[in-house]
Image: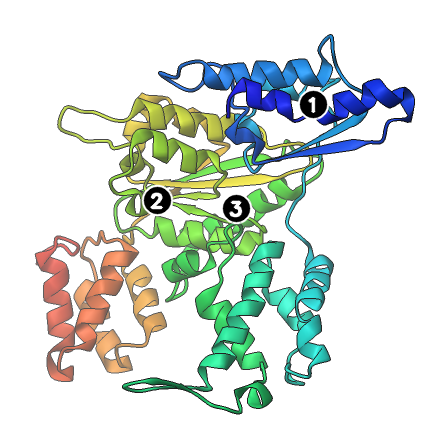
């Protein structure tokens, strides 16, 4: 869009304003996705100045020498941070309203609107409870709720389509069509996911086997985690709590961080890890980090740290430092959980001091800790546990919970008469158990 095109928007209002003066009617101009034409001036590298000219021209029309009083300008955007600051100053787009995600009551009203025609034509089954759907669709936007209803309709239609060498539609489909609760549940499970909100599937996958409280250190971490959650929620607090869980590889840091995140019950929970950013540029990583996240897994890998060199991404490091130190918007709360196996590296980068607290996740180092895990996983019989206890007695142990559970899974596949021997031999081979 060129600056001369921007001038055409208020042209009719200007003409009417000159003719009728104060009796002129109100003209409304709506800019959808206004960030596309009003980016921060100078932010577009290598441009020809077109973006800057558009912003300048729009500013002059809003409150310049020839400003008009019979125009209401409305701008809409998902990226307020990209809009030129001059546009949001008093006298311009000075009234700013944030339209958040609908709450449970709002979601019920939206679902009621989108299912009105279905109820009118008796196409919705009696077992569909909109109040239940409103609860289950937490963090859905209005558009996503509409998509949910359409996905349920598509599921119901698919039952009436006979797929063979040719696709045949039941001639009585219109009469037989009935959208049931199962159709909505299928849409929730497989078709429509909220763009914002909880990465519940990803985070729950990290704790699929639960958390084994094998000793006082794990109990203390979970208790401290609850205290930090309360601190983040407290109206008297700063609203920002950042925690680093550090320990040896396979010590269970990620699972504990995921457990704390789920226990927080925050409406916006995101998992930000290196596994989901393979091949991303430094700039792309920074954009994801800045969107607000609560669980940053394996932070040194996210920084592209390599011990040979060593090297790391300074751009990503600075983005993380901003996340760890910047207060959330007024009235908002933010809990950031990070995990790392290389705390010494973070110390050298100056990151450790940015955290509210650092909690160490230890490896299992005592026989009773290992036995507590083995009793919890229900793999060995009482006699086998007694044999393992005799084998562990008086020997040095050092193993992470993740590695121990992997050996337990391997032992499950072993014949019962060799299970204990194979398990102990594997611990010795990996250096987790001191050789006799």
Q: Residue under circle 3?
A: 224
Residue at the right extreme? 23
Q: Which mark is residue 11?
A: 1
Crowd rating for badge 3 (residues with CA inside 10 Å; few <14, some 14–19, many 20+): some
Q: Position of residue 399 (x, y in %)?
A: 23, 53
In three-dimensional space, the C-alpha distance between marks 2 and 3, rounded to whole angstroms, equals 23 Å
The mark lying in front, picked from 2 and 3, is: 2
Q: Position of residue 281 (x, y in %)?
A: 29, 33
Decide: is 151 above or below 318.
below
Decide: is 298 above or below 1.
below
Instruction: Looking at the picture, tell me which residue is in the foreground, 135 or 244.
Output: 135
In three-dimensional space, the C-alpha distance between marks 2 and 1, rounded to whole angstroms, equals 51 Å
Q: Secondary structure at mark 1?
A: helix
Residue drawn at point x = 73 percent, y = 26 percent: 12
Q: On the rendered image, what quadrant is the C terminus found in?
A: bottom left
Residue drawn at point x = 26 percent, y = 64 percent: 405
Decide: is 125 above or below 289.
below
Q: Is residue 95 left or right of residue 153?
A: right
* Upstream in sequence: badge 2 or badge 1: 1
Q: Residue under circle 2?
A: 273
Q: Secondary structure at mark 2?
A: loop
Instruction: Looking at the picture, tell me which residue is in the foreground, 354 or 20.
Output: 20
The mark lying in front, picked from 1 and 3, is: 1
The mark lying in front, picked from 2 and 1, is: 1
Residue 311 sits in which quadrant?
top left
Labelled pair 2, 1 in contact (Cβ < 8 Å): no
Labelled pair 1, 3 in contact (Cβ < 8 Å): no
């Amino acid at each position: 869009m060129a600056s001369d095109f921007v001038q055409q928007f208020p042209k009719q209002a200007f003409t009417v304003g000159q003719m009728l003066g104060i009796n002129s009617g109100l003209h409304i101009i709506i800019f959808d996705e206004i960030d596309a034409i009003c980016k921060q001036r100078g932010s577009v590298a290598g441009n020809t100045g077109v973006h800057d000219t558009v912003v300048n021209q729009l500013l002059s029309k809003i409150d310049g020498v020839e400003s008009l009083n019979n125009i209401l300008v409305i701008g809409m955007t998902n990226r307020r941070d990209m809009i030129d600051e001059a546009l949001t100053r008093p006298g311009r787009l000075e009234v700013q309203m944030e339209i958040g995600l609908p709450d449970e009551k709002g979601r019920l009203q939206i679902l009621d609107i989108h299912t009105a025609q279905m109820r009118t034509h008796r196409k919705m089954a009696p077992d569909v409870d909109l109040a239940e759907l409103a609860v289950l669709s937490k963090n859905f936007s209005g558009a996503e709720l509409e998509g949910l209803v359409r996905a349920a309709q598509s599921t119901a239609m698919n039952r009436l389509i006979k797929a063979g060498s040719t696709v045949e539609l039941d001639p009585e489909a219109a009469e037989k069509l009935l959208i049931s609760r199962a159709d909505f549940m299928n849409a929730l499970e497989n078709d429509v996911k909220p763009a914002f909100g909880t990465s519940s599937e990803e985070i729950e996958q990290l704790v699929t086997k639960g958390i084994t409280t094998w000793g006082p250190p794990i109990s203390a971490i979970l208790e401290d985690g609850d205290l930090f959650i309360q601190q983040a929620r407290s109206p008297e607090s700063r609203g920002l709590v950042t925690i680093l869980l550090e320990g040896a590889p396979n010590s269970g840091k990620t699972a504990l961080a995921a457990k704390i995140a789920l226990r927080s019950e925050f409406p916006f929970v995101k998992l930000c890890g290196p596994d989901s950013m393979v091949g991303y540029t430094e700039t792309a990583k920074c954009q994801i980090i800045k969107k607000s996240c609560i669980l940053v897994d394996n932070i040194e890998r996210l920084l592209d740290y390599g011990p040979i060199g060593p090297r790391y991404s300074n751009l990503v490091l600075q983005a993380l430092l901003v996340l760890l130190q910047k207060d959330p918007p007024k009235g908002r709360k933010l809990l950031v959980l990070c995990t790392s196996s290389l705390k010494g590296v973070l110390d050298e980068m100056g990151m450790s001091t940015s955290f509210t607290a650092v909690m160490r996740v230890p490896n299992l180092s005592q026989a009773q800790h290992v036995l507590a895990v083995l009793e919890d996983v229900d793999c060995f019989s009482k006699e086998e546990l007694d044999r393992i206890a005799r084998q562990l007695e008086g020997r040095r142990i050092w193993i992470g919970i993740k590695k121990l559970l992997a050996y337990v899974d391997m032992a499950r596949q072993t014949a019962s008469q060799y299970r204990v021997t194979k398990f102990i031999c594997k611990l010795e081979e990996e250096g987790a158990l001191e050789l006799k």
